Image (cartoon, rainbow, N blue to C red):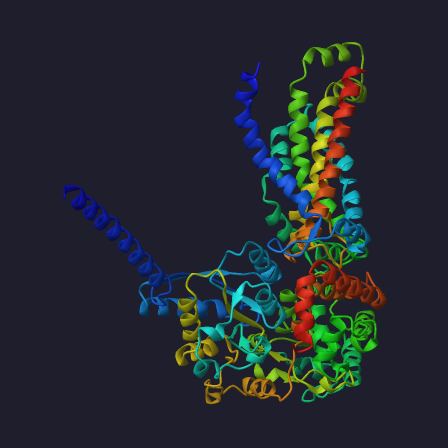
Amino acid sequence: MLWPYLYAAPAVGAMAFAFGFPLVQVVRDSFYAGSFDSPIWVGLDNYRGVLADPAFRESLLNNMKLLLTVPVMLGLGLAIALVLNDRIRGGRHYQAIVFLPYVLPATAIGIAFSFVLQENGVLNTALRKAHLGVLAQDWLGNSHLAIGSVGALVVWQQLGFAVVVFTAALLALPPETAEAARIDGAGWWQLQLRVLVPQIRPIIELLTVIQVITVISWVFNYVYVLTSGGPGYSSSVMELYIWRSFSNGSNGTAASVAVMLLGMAGVLIGLSLWVRRQAIAG
Amino acid sequence: MKRVLISLGAALVVGSAVFSVTAESKTAKTAADDPNNANLTYWYWAESDAPGANNWLKKQVALYEKAHPKVKISIVLQSTDTLTSAFTTVVQTKSGPDIATQWATLPSLTPAWAGATVPISDYVPASETKNWISTSENMWQGKLWAMPQYLIGIPFVWNKTLFKKAGLNPNVAPKTWADFLADAKKLKAAGITPFGMGNKDGYGGAWFFSLIGKQNLNSINELKDAMIGKQDFANPKFSGFYQTLADLKKSGYLNSDVASITFGQGFQLFGQKKVAMSWGTDGNVAQWEKQVGAKNMGIAAIPIWGNGKLATSYDVTQSSDAFITKWSKHPRAAAQFLTFLHSPQALKAWYKSTGVFPADKRFSASVVTDPIAKQMLKLDQSPVSVWPENFVPPQVDQNADLAGGEMITSGSGSPADVVKLWKSQLSQWKSQHPDEFRSYQKWATGH
C-alpha cells in the first residue's frame, strides 16, 4: 500500500518545492518589515497598514470595478460568436479580425493606446474633426475615466479569446438539436437563447472564472503601460500596488497584499467550483 | 625505508597540490581584482537629462576596451520610471551590476546605508576626486559614495516670438511669480498656451516641488526635518506650492493634456513651439535651441515665488551619478573605468555630444562658445544650489511626491488631499523601513 505514495513522492516533492515553498515564504514575509537579510517581526502590522492605506483601498476598488468588464466581454463575445456561427459570408475573416488583438502583446497595445487616448491623441483629434468635440475627454488624465479606459482596453483585447472559445463550443454541438428546433418552428432568437446557449453553459461558466481571475490578477501590464496607476492612484490595481511596494523595498507590505490577492482568487475559484457542482447536481 | 619513501612521496604530492591550489587561488584573487582584466556590467541612465549621453558612453566604452583589451563592459540602459525601483530590487538580492546609476543624494545614499555599495573614494585617489564637482551631494561618514558625471541646471525658458505675438516684451523674462502670472494671462488671451509640461508619470509635479516648493525654505535641513517628523509637512512652508500648481491648472495656464502626457513628451512641447514658457535641463535647452533657434528663445532663473532664503537659489545638481556595487568582483576595474570617464577627452566628448556641462573642474569654459550655453554655465555656477527631491526618501518620492502632483494636475485631489497623502506615506516609510529611517535621522542630524 506504501508503493503508490512512494511513486508519487518525487512529483509531490517537486510540486511542494515549486509552489509550496514560495507560498509559505510569502505568507511568512507578510509578518516582517525591513529587508530580506535583516527582517523585523511586525506581526499583523503590514496587514493593518495596508488596510489603512487609501492607495490600497483604491486599488482594491479598481479591481472590483474592472470585474464589470467580465459580463461585457462575455456578452459581446457570445453575441459575436452566435452571429459568426450562422455561417455568415466572410465569417472566418471576421473571426480572425476579432481575434487579432488577443495575439498582440499587452505592452505594445498599452503603448499604442496611450497615444490614442491622450487629451490631444488620435481619438480626440478624430472626434473633434468629426464635430463631435463634446465627446472628447481626457481618457487617461481624468481620474474618473482612467480606470474605465483600462477596462475598455482589457475588453478590446480579451474579446477575441471569448469569441474563439464560444465559436469552438458552438461548432462542437451536435447539429441535430438545432435542426430539430428549426423544424419545430423555433425562430432565430429562440434557437440561440433557448437551444444553443444553454448547451454551452459549462463553457460560459469556465470562461467567466478565467476572466474573473484575469481581471483580478492579470491586468498589471495594461495598467502599468497605459496609466501607471494614475493620476494619483485612481487607476491603480492590487498587482501594481504589490509591484510598487516590492520595488520600494517594502517586502512585507508587498507580501501581505499578495496573500490577500491569493485569498481572493482562492475564494473565487472555490465559488466557481461550487457553482459548477451545483449545476451538475441540478 | 620503502614506507618512509612512500610517505615522503605522498607528502610531497599533497604538499604540491595544496601549494598549487593556494597559488592558483591567490592568482585568481589577483586576477579578480585586476583593473585591466574584468567583465563589467554598467546599468546606465542619463539620456533623459542629456540627450546624446547613450551614444557618448557607447563610444567611450569602445575607446576604453580598445585601450584595455581584457576589459569588457556591458551597458544596460535603464528607463526613467524604473531607475530607482530596479536597483532597489537588486539591493534585496545583493547581486547585479558592477556599476549602477542613481539620482544623487538619497537614491544613491540609501543603497549605501543598506550595505549595497562601496565608497568610490576608497578606490579613486583624492587627487582625482578633488576635481569632481558636486561631490557634497553624495558624502556620508566622510566618504564619497558616487561619481558625478555632469551638472544639470534647470533654467526657465520662454519663446520670444510667442511673447511678441501676445504683446509682451520678448526680451524680458518674468522675474517674480506675479510677473509670471501676468505674462501667462496675456499669453492665454492671445490664444497661446502659457506653460508646458507633462505629468502623467508624476515627474512634472516633482519638478514643481523642487523648483517652486523649495522657495519658502531657508535651508534644505528644514525639509529633512519635515521628512523625519520634526516639522509638519502640512505647514504651507512645505506644501503651499500645491495650491499654486492647482491655481495654474484652474486658470488654464498649463497645456490641456498635462495629465495625459509623460514628462518626456511634455519637454517636446517647447521645441515644437506649442507653448510659450517651460523649464528643462541644460540638455533639453540645448535641443530646443536647435529647434526654436537661439534668437527666438530666452533663458533665465526660475521666477521667484516664495520668500525663503532658497527662493533665490539656482537649481543645479549632478542629477544622476555612478557608483560601484558591494558585490562587484572588480571594484578596481570599475573605478578605473569611471575615472577614465573624467579624462580630458571624455569630458570634451561629453560636452560635444550632449551640450551639458561635465561635473569636473578641469572642463575648460573656453570650449563653451554658444551664447545660450554661456548663460546656462553662468547660472550653473550660482553660489547656492539645491535639488530638494534628492532629499526625499525614494519611497515617499514615488508614492507621495509623484502621485501628489498627478492628483493636482488631473484635478482628482485638492492640495489638502495631497498633504494627507504625504503624511500617510511618511508614516508608512517610517514603519516599513525602520533601518532606513534611522539612518536618515542620523544623516539628517549630521551624525
Left/right of residue B14 with respect to residue B440 in the rendered view? left
Left/right of residue B212 with respect to residue A96 in the rendered view? right
Where residue A108 appears, x then y in whole percent? Answer: 59, 49
User: Is B365 situated above or below A99?
Assistant: below
Between B318 and B197, the residue placed more toward the observer is B318
Outermost residue to the front: B1
Where residue B387 appears, x then y in whole percent? Answer: 65, 77
Between A151 and A262, the residue placed more toward the observer is A262
User: Is A39 situated above or below B137?
Assistant: above
Residue B379: name its quadrant.
bottom right
User: Residue at 53% of width from left, 82% of height from top?
Assistant: B133
Quadrant (top left/top right/bottom left/bottom right) for the C terminus of chain B = bottom right
User: Is B71 situated above or below A260?
Assistant: below
From this viewpoint, is residue B276 visible?
no
User: Residue at 66% of width from left, 44% of height from top?
Assistant: A26
Where residue A264 appears, x then y in whole percent? Answer: 75, 38
Quadrant (top left/top right/bottom left/bottom right) for the N terminus of chain B = top left
User: Is B72 situated above or below B346?
Assistant: above
Left/right of residue B144 with respect to residue B248 in the rendered view? left
User: Residue at 57% of width from left, 58% of height from top?
Assistant: B91
From this viewpoint, is residue A167 visible?
yes
Residue B212: name its quadrant.
bottom right
Where residue A275 appears, x then y in whole percent? Answer: 78, 24
Between B401 and A77, the residue placed more toward the observer is B401
Residue A187: name its quadrant.
top right
Count of numbered tags: 0
User: Residue at 74% of width from left, 81% of height from top?
Assistant: B215
